[in-house]
Amino acid sequence: MHIHWNRLTKKEIQDSIGKALSTNVSYRNNKIMGVPGSALSPHIITPELVQGDPLLRVMLENPNHIGCLTIEKESESFFSGTHQLECEAIKLCAEEIMQGLPNQQDGYIAGGGTECNLEAMWIFRNYFIQNFGSQTSEIGLLFSEDSSISVIKGCDLLNIRPFVVRVTPKNRKMDKEHLRAQIILAKNEGIKYFIGIINLGTEMFGSVDDLDTVCACLEEQTLPYKIHVDAGLGGFIYPFTKPGNKLNFKNPNITSIHSDASKMLRAPFGTSVFMIRKGYMNFALTPEARYVAGKDHTIIGSRSGSNAIALWMLLRTLGSDGVRLMMERIARYAHQLCQTLDSTGVNYFYEPGMNVIAIRQEDVTKDLKDKYALVPDDPENPRWWRTLITDGVTPAFIDAVNNP
């Protein structure tokens, strides 16, 4: 697998954003009375402050990126310049990082991983209803006990029945026998269609699910299914540290993926990338939104263009080589921390290629928890404490673990 895109110079970044903003309408420079918005308040950002800073310029201009911009070329024309940069960012993520075919994926910059998981579940629920005549009660959601809490939220909101699979403690992967038992139970109780959530880096452990096992168990029971990959944590690191992995669009069993740029690329919170194969976004179309050019296919509706531009800037400033070096450095630091923990006899879980080390409760001192702001799996009854290695972590942090 080869991931490559060019980096741009600071001037090229500034020129590209300047051109995009000049294509957009400007609340400050044009006479606008119909668009429900305005430039950012001068009490927050003054025009004088943004000089020479392209991202602050975008925030000040406050473009609306409503809808899924990769579908309709007729999306809100008022902000077509910055819309195009979002489409370019989606294309880089879907085609280069996640190995999709050219122009065969749609997507948008969502408000977080929860929204991305809900969007996938909403689309697949409607897919089964519209294409198979399914009842909602006949659709089940299959996922690991280590999955994000957003999956349970989605089941509640969309009225989909959850089927939670236990994990094997040693490798945190779904227990095959329990997986098979849950699928058979679901089938016996009237479930005819499945949505599967596959983790590429769980929140607490950074563990990676075995997609082949899940698909094989579903196919044993001849149940139609759709797979969404929750790569909120691993989507920007695993493709670089484990380039031969199967959790990307080259795998025909995968229909949608999401990655979170705020976790790994140091993007603002609320910069998650939702990607899905062409044709599926239409199952989330809201035709009643006639006042929106191109209609709307998203949960969030109106959204700030500044997060999309922040992601585009990061990808284009770093280039693929810069992202690769960052991710390899993070993985190296994670391995270094594992070696440090090994030398002190600490029990932990680590998924190779990821950036999470989960330490058992009995091996974590209060000083260590407080000093490094470790996160428990359950604040009231912790069993594990998460250590997350990001680009902001330095070797000095790791060296100090031996001397908290």
Image: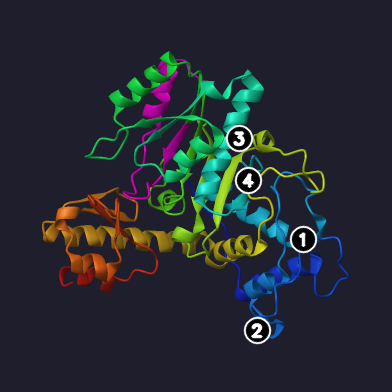
As measured in the structure, the alpha-carbon distance from the residue carrying label 1 to the one carrying label 3 is 26 Å
Q: Please, what is the three-letter code of the amino acid marked with disc 2?
A: Leu
Give residue 250's position: percent from left, percent from top.
52, 37
Q: For numbered disc 1, what is the local secondary structure?
A: helix
Q: Do the residues labelled 4 and 3 touch (CB within 8 Å)?
A: no
**Residues at marks 2 and 1 touching, judged by CB atoms closer than 8 Å:** no
Q: In which quarter of the image is residue 272?
A: bottom right
- CA separation, marks 4 and 3? 10 Å
Q: Is residue 216 magenta?
A: yes
Q: How crowded is mark 2: few (under 14 residues within 10 Å), some or many (20 or more)?
A: few
Give the quadrant of the C terminus.
bottom left
Mark 4 is surrounded, within 10 Å at the Cα level, by few (under 14), some (14 to 19) or many (20 or more) other residues, namely some
- Front one among 47 and 153: 153
Q: Mark on residue 49?
A: 2
Q: Which of 387 and 70 is in front in this view?
A: 387
Label 1 – label 4 distance at C-alpha: 20 Å
Which sits earlier in the primary sequence, circle 4 or circle 3? 3
**80 on left or right of 109:** right
Q: In which quarter of the image is residue 366?
A: bottom left
Left or right of 204? Residue 101 is right
Helix, strand or loop at mark 4: loop
The local crowd at label 3, few if under 14, some if 14 to 19, many if 20 or more residues have their Cα within 10 Å, is: many
Name which residue type carries label 4: Ile
| Dot 2: element | helix
Instruction: Please name the residue shown 33% across and 58% down the image.
Output: 331
**Which circle's residue, 2 or 1, is located before the other in the chain?**
2
Which residue position is annotated with label 4? 299
N-terminal of the pair, mark 1 or mark 4, is 1
Q: Do the residues labelled 1 and 4 touch (CB within 8 Å)?
A: no
Residue 233 visible in the displayed image: yes
